[in-house]
Amino acid sequence: QVQLVESGGGLVQPGGSLRLSCAASGIIFSANDMGWYRQAPGKQRELVAGISTGGSTNYAESVKGRFTISRDNVKNTVYLQMNSLKPEDTAVYYCNAKFFSISEYWGQGTQVTVSS
């Protein structure tokens, strides 16, 4: 059974930081490209950051320079370090695992709210 379990969300003031974690089980973690997506109310889900099996990263323009994605293939965990948070970063953040076009899995999501 595949599980992607996110944690680390919460309420933070503008300018603050959070670190999201996504612990994976039931997949060969090192063989999966991993990503963080987010969905704000009334908006489509969008890619925030991705990291390939080889460690290459890509980011949405809106988060470049503020967010950092990383992975630990021993702990089967992907992280999203979020700094200089803005109210527009408020959303439910989802972890994603992809194995080529063969399989794709999603976590249940974790709420991030940036507000004073």
Image (cartoon, rainbow, N blue to C red):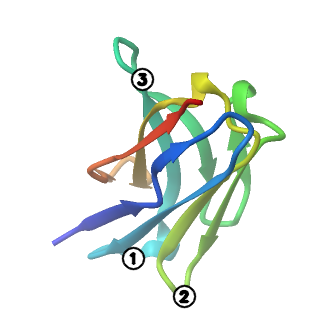
x, y (%) of residue 15?
74, 38
CA separation, marks 1 and 3? 30 Å
Q: Mark 3: few, some, or many residues within 10 Å (few <14, many ≥20)?
A: some
| Residue indicated by mark 3 | 40
Mark 3 lies on a secondary structure that is loop
Q: Residue furthest front?
A: 116
| Residue indicated by mark 2 | 74
Q: Hey, what amino acid is under mark 3?
A: Ala
Q: Residue furthest right?
A: 65
Kindly identify the residue that appears in the image at 26 percent across and 76 percent down: 26
x, y (%) of residue 11?
49, 44
Above/below status of 18 relative to 88:
below
| Residue indicated by mark 1 | 28
Q: Mark 1: few, some, or many residues within 10 Å (few <14, many ≥20)?
A: few
Above/below status of 19 relative to 58:
below
Of residues 82 and 107, which is closer to you in this image? Answer: 82
